[in-house]
Protein backbone atom coordinates (compact mmCIF):
# COMPACT_ATOMS: atom_id res chain seq x y z
CA UNK A 1 0.00 0.00 0.00
CA UNK A 2 1.64 3.30 -1.07
CA UNK A 3 1.99 6.29 1.25
CA UNK A 4 -0.88 8.19 -0.40
CA UNK A 5 -3.34 5.43 0.48
CA UNK A 6 -1.99 5.25 4.03
CA UNK A 7 -2.49 9.01 4.47
CA UNK A 8 -6.00 8.79 3.00
CA UNK A 9 -6.92 6.02 5.46
CA UNK A 10 -5.36 7.94 8.38
CA UNK A 11 -7.33 11.09 7.53
CA UNK A 12 -10.58 9.16 7.14
CA UNK A 13 -10.15 7.32 10.43
CA UNK A 14 -8.80 10.18 12.58
CA UNK A 15 -9.47 13.48 10.80
CA UNK A 16 -8.72 15.65 13.83
CA UNK A 17 -5.42 13.96 14.54
CA UNK A 18 -4.41 13.89 10.87
CA UNK A 19 -4.78 17.68 10.67
CA UNK A 20 -3.10 18.40 14.01
CA UNK A 21 0.40 19.71 14.67
CA UNK A 22 1.64 16.28 15.78
CA UNK A 23 0.07 14.33 12.92
CA UNK A 24 3.38 12.88 11.72
CA UNK A 25 4.30 11.58 15.17
CA UNK A 26 0.77 10.22 15.69
CA UNK A 27 0.81 8.36 12.37
CA UNK A 28 4.28 6.92 12.98
CA UNK A 29 3.18 5.77 16.43
CA UNK A 30 0.03 4.10 15.10
CA UNK A 31 1.90 2.36 12.27
CA UNK A 32 4.38 0.93 14.79
CA UNK A 33 1.49 -0.28 16.95
CA UNK A 34 -0.17 -1.99 13.98
CA UNK A 35 3.17 -3.50 13.02
CA UNK A 36 3.64 -4.86 16.55
CA UNK A 37 0.17 -6.42 16.34
CA UNK A 38 1.01 -8.10 13.04
CA UNK A 39 -1.64 -6.15 11.12
CA UNK A 40 0.90 -4.71 8.70
CA UNK A 41 4.61 -4.86 7.98
CA UNK A 42 6.94 -1.86 7.87
CA UNK A 43 10.12 -1.71 5.77
CA UNK A 44 12.50 -1.94 8.74
CA UNK A 45 16.15 -1.54 7.86
CA UNK A 46 15.42 -0.34 4.32
CA UNK A 47 16.40 3.34 4.40
CA UNK A 48 15.40 4.09 0.80
CA UNK A 49 11.82 3.13 1.65
CA UNK A 50 11.45 5.84 4.34
CA UNK A 51 11.20 9.60 3.86
CA UNK A 52 13.60 12.14 5.36
CA UNK A 53 11.18 13.58 7.94
CA UNK A 54 11.37 13.05 11.69
CA UNK A 55 9.97 10.73 12.68
CA UNK A 56 10.40 9.05 9.31
CA UNK A 57 7.33 7.67 7.56
CA UNK A 58 7.40 4.66 5.20
CA UNK A 59 6.97 5.19 1.50
CA UNK A 60 4.79 2.07 1.54
CA UNK A 61 3.57 -0.65 3.89
CA UNK A 62 2.85 -4.31 3.32
CA UNK A 63 -0.44 -5.94 4.27
CA UNK A 64 -0.78 -9.68 4.87
CA UNK A 65 -2.21 -11.75 2.06
CA UNK A 66 -5.92 -12.42 2.35
CA UNK A 67 -6.83 -16.09 2.18
CA UNK A 68 -9.41 -16.88 -0.50
CA UNK A 69 -12.89 -17.23 0.87
CA UNK A 70 -14.41 -20.67 0.98
CA UNK A 71 -17.84 -21.65 2.20
CA UNK A 72 -17.96 -23.43 5.52
CA UNK A 73 -17.61 -27.21 5.39
CA UNK A 74 -20.62 -29.39 5.99
CA UNK A 75 -19.30 -30.12 9.47
CA UNK A 76 -19.51 -26.45 10.42
CA UNK A 77 -22.46 -25.38 8.25
CA UNK A 78 -25.40 -24.36 10.40
CA UNK A 79 -28.28 -21.90 10.47
CA UNK A 80 -27.30 -18.41 11.62
CA UNK A 81 -29.29 -15.40 12.68
CA UNK A 82 -29.59 -12.46 10.20
CA UNK A 83 -26.92 -10.56 12.16
CA UNK A 84 -24.47 -13.27 11.09
CA UNK A 85 -25.36 -13.58 7.40
CA UNK A 86 -21.75 -12.80 6.48
CA UNK A 87 -20.63 -16.10 8.03
CA UNK A 88 -21.90 -18.15 5.06
CA UNK A 89 -19.32 -16.66 2.68
CA UNK A 90 -16.43 -16.21 5.13
CA UNK A 91 -13.43 -18.47 5.52
CA UNK A 92 -13.49 -19.42 9.21
CA UNK A 93 -11.94 -22.09 11.38
CA UNK A 94 -13.78 -24.61 13.50
CA UNK A 95 -12.84 -22.56 16.57
CA UNK A 96 -14.48 -19.51 15.00
CA UNK A 97 -17.67 -21.49 14.44
CA UNK A 98 -17.67 -22.63 18.05
CA UNK A 99 -17.55 -19.01 19.21
CA UNK A 100 -20.15 -18.00 16.66
CA UNK A 101 -22.51 -20.74 17.82
CA UNK A 102 -22.62 -19.13 21.27
CA UNK A 103 -23.00 -15.64 19.82
CA UNK A 104 -25.74 -16.91 17.52
CA UNK A 105 -27.58 -18.37 20.50
CA UNK A 106 -27.33 -15.03 22.29
CA UNK A 107 -28.79 -13.22 19.26
CA UNK A 108 -31.61 -15.79 19.18
CA UNK A 109 -32.41 -15.66 22.88
CA UNK A 110 -32.44 -11.84 23.01
CA UNK A 111 -34.14 -11.14 19.66
CA UNK A 112 -37.53 -10.35 21.21
CA UNK A 113 -36.21 -9.03 24.52
CA UNK A 114 -34.70 -5.58 23.95
CA UNK A 115 -34.06 -5.17 27.66
CA UNK A 116 -31.44 -7.93 27.41
CA UNK A 117 -29.58 -5.98 24.72
CA UNK A 118 -29.23 -2.82 26.77
CA UNK A 119 -25.47 -2.08 26.65
CA UNK A 120 -23.35 -3.45 29.48
CA UNK A 121 -19.53 -3.51 29.90
CA UNK A 122 -17.52 -5.81 27.66
CA UNK A 123 -16.45 -8.39 30.22
CA UNK A 124 -19.94 -8.67 31.65
CA UNK A 125 -21.33 -9.38 28.19
CA UNK A 126 -18.48 -11.78 27.49
CA UNK A 127 -19.31 -13.79 30.60
CA UNK A 128 -22.99 -13.82 29.67
CA UNK A 129 -22.29 -15.21 26.19
CA UNK A 130 -19.27 -17.46 26.79
CA UNK A 131 -19.16 -18.01 30.55
CA UNK A 132 -15.68 -16.51 30.13
CA UNK A 133 -15.26 -12.83 30.96
CA UNK A 134 -12.11 -12.45 28.82
CA UNK A 135 -13.24 -14.23 25.66
CA UNK A 136 -14.44 -11.11 23.83
CA UNK A 137 -11.14 -9.38 24.62
CA UNK A 138 -9.40 -12.13 22.68
CA UNK A 139 -11.79 -11.94 19.73
CA UNK A 140 -11.88 -8.18 19.15
CA UNK A 141 -8.65 -7.99 17.16
CA UNK A 142 -9.45 -11.07 15.08
CA UNK A 143 -11.38 -11.94 11.98
CA UNK A 144 -14.82 -12.08 13.63
CA UNK A 145 -14.69 -8.32 14.22
CA UNK A 146 -13.26 -7.40 10.82
CA UNK A 147 -15.12 -4.64 8.89
CA UNK A 148 -18.61 -5.72 7.89
CA UNK A 149 -18.77 -8.42 10.55
CA UNK A 150 -19.47 -8.27 14.28
CA UNK A 151 -19.54 -4.98 16.16
CA UNK A 152 -19.70 -4.11 19.85
CA UNK A 153 -22.95 -2.26 19.18
CA UNK A 154 -24.58 -5.45 17.86
CA UNK A 155 -23.62 -7.27 21.04
CA UNK A 156 -24.89 -4.47 23.22
CA UNK A 157 -21.56 -3.83 24.86
CA UNK A 158 -18.73 -1.32 25.16
CA UNK A 159 -15.19 -1.11 26.44
CA UNK A 160 -15.09 0.37 29.93
CA UNK A 161 -11.74 2.14 30.36
CA UNK A 162 -9.80 0.82 33.37
CA UNK A 163 -9.81 3.29 36.27
CA UNK A 164 -6.86 5.62 36.70
CA UNK A 165 -5.46 5.67 40.24
CA UNK A 166 -4.67 9.24 41.24
CA UNK A 167 -4.32 11.55 44.23
CA UNK A 168 -5.66 15.11 44.20
CA UNK A 169 -3.07 17.53 45.57
CA UNK A 170 -3.95 21.14 44.74
CA UNK A 171 -5.77 23.62 42.53
CA UNK A 172 -3.39 23.60 39.59
CA UNK A 173 -4.09 22.57 36.02
CA UNK A 174 -1.60 19.71 35.56
CA UNK A 175 -1.97 15.94 35.88
CA UNK A 176 1.43 14.31 36.42
CA UNK A 177 1.43 10.61 35.49
CA UNK A 178 4.14 8.16 36.58
CA UNK A 179 4.53 4.86 34.72
CA UNK A 180 5.49 2.80 37.79
CA UNK A 181 4.07 2.56 41.30
CA UNK A 182 7.12 3.46 43.40
CA UNK A 183 7.82 6.59 41.39
CA UNK A 184 4.14 7.50 41.66
CA UNK A 185 4.36 7.24 45.46
CA UNK A 186 7.55 9.33 45.52
CA UNK A 187 6.08 12.10 43.36
CA UNK A 188 2.84 12.08 45.34
CA UNK A 189 4.59 12.42 48.70
CA UNK A 190 7.10 15.05 47.58
CA UNK A 191 4.47 17.23 45.88
CA UNK A 192 1.86 17.04 48.64
CA UNK A 193 3.26 19.94 50.74
CA UNK A 194 3.68 22.25 47.72
CA UNK A 195 1.99 20.96 44.55
CA UNK A 196 2.49 24.11 42.47
CA UNK A 197 0.77 23.61 39.09
CA UNK A 198 0.09 19.95 39.88
CA UNK A 199 -3.57 19.26 40.50
CA UNK A 200 -3.14 15.48 40.74
CA UNK A 201 -0.54 12.74 40.50
CA UNK A 202 -1.58 9.48 38.82
CA UNK A 203 -0.23 5.94 38.57
CA UNK A 204 -0.22 5.01 34.89
CA UNK A 205 0.33 1.29 35.52
CA UNK A 206 2.33 0.68 32.37
CA UNK A 207 0.31 -0.05 29.24
CA UNK A 208 -2.96 0.29 31.14
CA UNK A 209 -2.55 4.06 30.76
CA UNK A 210 -3.24 3.80 27.03
CA UNK A 211 -6.85 2.93 27.92
CA UNK A 212 -7.27 4.53 31.36
CA UNK A 213 -6.38 7.97 30.02
CA UNK A 214 -10.01 8.29 28.92
CA UNK A 215 -11.01 8.58 32.58
CA UNK A 216 -8.92 11.74 33.00
CA UNK A 217 -12.11 13.52 31.90
CA UNK A 218 -13.43 12.78 35.39
CA UNK A 219 -10.73 14.96 36.99
CA UNK A 220 -12.03 18.52 36.70
CA UNK A 221 -9.68 21.34 35.87
CA UNK A 222 -6.99 19.40 34.00
CA UNK A 223 -5.54 21.48 31.17
CA UNK A 224 -2.18 19.70 30.88
CA UNK A 225 -1.11 16.06 31.11
CA UNK A 226 2.57 15.42 31.82
CA UNK A 227 4.00 11.90 31.74
CA UNK A 228 7.14 10.40 33.25
CA UNK A 229 8.21 6.85 32.44
CA UNK A 230 11.14 4.59 31.69
CA UNK A 231 13.51 5.49 28.87
CA UNK A 232 13.02 2.36 26.79
CA UNK A 233 10.86 1.31 23.87
CA UNK A 234 7.77 0.55 25.93
CA UNK A 235 8.17 3.52 28.26
CA UNK A 236 8.20 5.89 25.29
CA UNK A 237 5.52 4.19 23.20
CA UNK A 238 2.96 4.21 26.05
CA UNK A 239 2.58 8.01 26.31
CA UNK A 240 2.77 8.49 22.53
CA UNK A 241 -0.11 6.05 22.01
CA UNK A 242 -2.02 7.45 24.98
CA UNK A 243 -1.67 10.93 23.49
CA UNK A 244 -3.50 9.84 20.32
CA UNK A 245 -6.35 8.50 22.48
CA UNK A 246 -6.38 11.67 24.57
CA UNK A 247 -6.85 14.00 21.63
CA UNK A 248 -9.65 11.80 20.26
CA UNK A 249 -11.39 12.13 23.64
CA UNK A 250 -11.09 15.91 23.71
CA UNK A 251 -8.30 15.86 26.28
CA UNK A 252 -4.95 17.67 26.08
CA UNK A 253 -2.19 15.72 24.37
CA UNK A 254 0.23 13.87 26.64
CA UNK A 255 3.49 15.75 26.97
CA UNK A 256 6.76 14.64 28.57
CA UNK A 257 7.64 15.77 32.09
CA UNK A 258 10.83 17.17 30.56
CA UNK A 259 12.65 18.17 33.73
CA UNK A 260 12.27 14.67 35.14
CA UNK A 261 13.65 13.16 31.92
CA UNK A 262 16.57 15.58 32.11
CA UNK A 263 17.44 14.14 35.51
CA UNK A 264 16.88 10.59 34.31
CA UNK A 265 19.36 11.02 31.47
CA UNK A 266 22.03 12.00 33.98
CA UNK A 267 22.03 8.39 35.21
CA UNK A 268 23.91 5.46 33.71
CA UNK A 269 21.95 3.14 31.45
CA UNK A 270 21.44 -0.59 31.95
CA UNK A 271 21.05 -3.47 29.46
CA UNK A 272 17.75 -3.33 27.59
CA UNK A 273 16.17 -4.05 24.22
CA UNK A 274 17.95 -3.28 20.95
CA UNK A 275 15.94 -0.79 18.88
CA UNK A 276 16.36 -0.04 15.17
CA UNK A 277 17.34 3.44 14.02
CA UNK A 278 13.93 4.21 12.48
CA UNK A 279 12.09 2.85 15.50
CA UNK A 280 14.27 4.98 17.78
CA UNK A 281 13.43 8.10 15.75
CA UNK A 282 9.71 7.34 16.06
CA UNK A 283 9.95 6.76 19.81
CA UNK A 284 12.04 9.83 20.57
CA UNK A 285 9.81 12.14 18.49
CA UNK A 286 7.52 12.40 21.53
CA UNK A 287 10.31 14.00 23.57
CA UNK A 288 11.41 17.65 23.30
CA UNK A 289 14.25 18.20 20.79
CA UNK A 290 16.93 18.71 23.45
CA UNK A 291 16.36 15.15 24.81
CA UNK A 292 16.01 13.25 21.56
CA UNK A 293 19.62 12.66 20.58
CA UNK A 294 20.76 11.37 23.96
CA UNK A 295 17.73 9.11 24.25
CA UNK A 296 18.20 7.92 20.67
CA UNK A 297 21.75 6.85 21.53
CA UNK A 298 20.54 4.92 24.58
CA UNK A 299 17.96 3.02 22.52
CA UNK A 300 20.34 2.26 19.64
CA UNK A 301 22.91 0.84 22.04
CA UNK A 302 20.40 -1.69 23.40
CA UNK A 303 20.27 0.09 26.76
CA UNK A 304 17.54 1.59 28.94
CA UNK A 305 17.15 3.81 32.01
CA UNK A 306 14.39 2.93 34.49
CA UNK A 307 12.58 5.89 36.02
CA UNK A 308 13.35 4.55 39.50
CA UNK A 309 16.91 5.81 38.94
CA UNK A 310 15.62 9.24 39.96
CA UNK A 311 14.83 8.06 43.48
CA UNK A 312 13.18 9.84 46.38
CA UNK A 313 16.44 11.12 47.81
CA UNK A 314 17.52 12.76 44.57
CA UNK A 315 14.13 14.32 43.86
CA UNK A 316 13.83 15.60 47.45
CA UNK A 317 17.12 17.49 47.09
CA UNK A 318 16.46 18.93 43.62
CA UNK A 319 13.29 20.97 43.11
CA UNK A 320 14.00 21.77 39.44
CA UNK A 321 11.86 18.81 38.32
CA UNK A 322 8.58 20.12 39.76
CA UNK A 323 5.97 20.61 37.00
Image (cartoon, grey):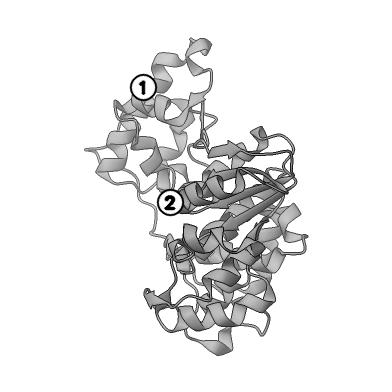
Q: Which residue is pictured at 48% across the width and 57% down the height?
A: 312
State whether residue 6 is above or below residue 85.
below
State whether residue 121 is above or below residue 25.
above
CA neighbours of label 2 inside 10 A, class few (<14), some (14 to 19), many (20+): some
CA neighbours of label 1 inside 10 A, class few (<14), some (14 to 19), many (20+): few
**Which mark is on residue 128?**
1
Mark 1 and mark 2 residues within 8 Å of each other at the beta carbon: no
Front one among 316 and 144: 316
Q: Which residue is pictured at 46% across the width and 52% down the height?
A: 207
Instruction: Answer yes or no: is residue 276 visible.
Output: no
Q: What's the CA distance linking mark 1 and mark 2?
A: 37 Å
**Which mark is on residue 182?**
2
Disc 1 on helix, strand or loop?
helix
State whether residue 115 is above or below residue 206.
above
- Answer with left or right where residue 110 lies relative to residue 134: right
Q: Quadrant of the N terminus?
A: bottom right
**Which mark is on residue 233?**
none
Disc 2 on helix, strand or loop?
helix
Residue at the outermost left position: 75
Q: Which residue is pictured at 55% across the width and 30% down the height?
A: 153
Q: Quadrant of the C terminus?
A: bottom right
Q: Position of residue 100 (x, y in %)?
A: 35, 33
Instruction: Answer yes or no: is residue 317 visible.
Output: yes
Q: Which residue is pictured at 36% across the width and 49% down the height?
A: 91
Q: Nearer the viewer, mark 1 or mark 2?
A: 2
Amino acid sequence: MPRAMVMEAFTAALPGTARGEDSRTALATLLEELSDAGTLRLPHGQRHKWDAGRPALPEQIRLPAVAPRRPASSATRRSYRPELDWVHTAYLTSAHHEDLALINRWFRDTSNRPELRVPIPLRERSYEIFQDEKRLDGLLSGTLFAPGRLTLEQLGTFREPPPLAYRLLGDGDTLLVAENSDTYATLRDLLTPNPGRTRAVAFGSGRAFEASIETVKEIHGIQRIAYYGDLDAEGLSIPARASVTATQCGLPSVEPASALYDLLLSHASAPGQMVSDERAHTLTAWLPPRLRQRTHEVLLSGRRIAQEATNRNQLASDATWCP
